[in-house]
Image (cartoon, rainbow, N blue to C red):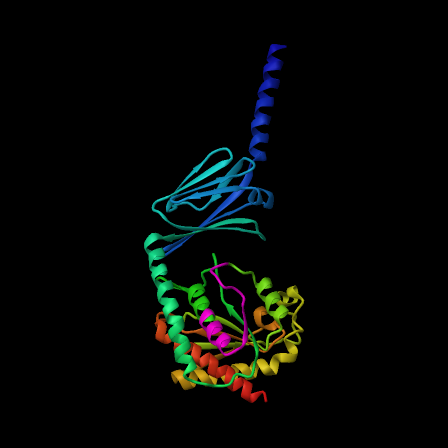
Amino acid sequence: MKKIIFIFLSISVLMAVSLSAQLKKEVLLKFSKQEGHMRIVFEAEGTLINNAKVTISSPQIKIEFPETFNLTGQKDLSFELVPSEKLLVINLKEKGEIKFFRLSSPARLVFDIQKKEIQKKKQTEKKIEKQAEKQTEKTVEKQPVPILSMVFVIDAGHGGYDFGIISGDVSEKDISLSLAKDLNTVLSKKGKKVFLTRKVDQYISLADRINLVNQKSPDVFISLHFSISENFILYSPKFEEQDSNEIVDFYSLSSRQKKYIEKSKALSDSIERAIKDKFKANVIRREIPLPILNSVGAPSVLIEFPSPRFLAYDQQMRARLINLIINGITLYGRSSL
């Protein structure tokens, strides 16, 4: 009888241990590192992520999950992980600026860490940018050209944890935002109504960008990026009549651009002329069914400027780029009369 009881208790203990292991929630760790920047991502089911309590005190991050968890994922990390039953402590090797995002689809906790020296450099660059904005206004306003379009939406590509292309210590998200702000300043001074899809370094989903543009009903929509090459690249919307584009269909907005397709082409033509006038450079033209273009109800173009490896995005260069966009918009306005 005692032997039976012992076996029963042993089985019960084993079952309890097994059940406890099964009850642990899986948390997947993802990690990436580039010069001066580091990104740490924890992915798990929605309730675990949404109810997690995050405390940040550089160089340490504490994540308190509502349930016990099992951490899996990458090894050979550049930081120390100290997991316990419900608490996860991340010890970074050095202090830096930590930005935290709680995202969905899939549910994630995202931490962007920027080295302290890079942070100081960016603060210096911001001071220079303010001075550059004033100089940009003066440089552009020397050319008193009439702009017929009245409402603009300018899309600064990427943002937040989405850095875009990184070249050295320069990221696409920062350059695109800087150019968008410069363009906003110049157009606003000319009495135009301008909306930016983002005004700060934050992540904006594709769906939110598209919805914002369509809510504002602009006369012109311009999305700003830079490429990995030395070329200027212009993207125009394109529709495949025979094939269904699943990404565009997902947003159920593909019909909005169709009546503006010719105007979008004319806008790209005008900006191409302005680029050639200003830089004497070849321009690559691409017609692609990009959702950010195909789903917008306005004349639209996506501009990719040359990589920072080939173009220094200093005050003088930014003024030249803003000038060419203004000239392109002006040429477009004249051609649409």
Is residue 194 shown in magenta?
yes
In which quadrant of the rendered image does the C terminus lie? bottom right
Is residue 223 shown in magenta?
no
Q: Is residue 160 above or below residue 241?
A: above
Residue 169, by quadrant, is: bottom left
Image position, residue 127 (x, y; %): 36, 64
Image position, residue 158 (x, y; %): 49, 63
* Left/right of residue 181 with respect to residue 6 in the rendered view: left
* 132 and 102: which is toward the camera: 132
Image position, residue 28 (x, y; %): 51, 45
Residue 153, by quadrant, is: bottom right
Image position, residue 57 (x, y; %): 41, 43
Residue at point 41%, 45% (across, down): 75
Residue at point 50%, 74% (across, down): 188
Q: In this view, does 247 lie above or below 32?
A: below
Residue at point 42%, 86% (across, down): 277
Residue at point 34%, 45% (across, down): 93
In which quadrant of the rendered image does the N terminus lie? top right
Q: Is residue 197 above or below residue 38?
A: below
* Left/right of residue 278 with respect to residue 242 in the rendered view: left
Specify the segment rendered in magenta.
Answer: 181-202
Asked if residue 231 shows in the view, the reply is no
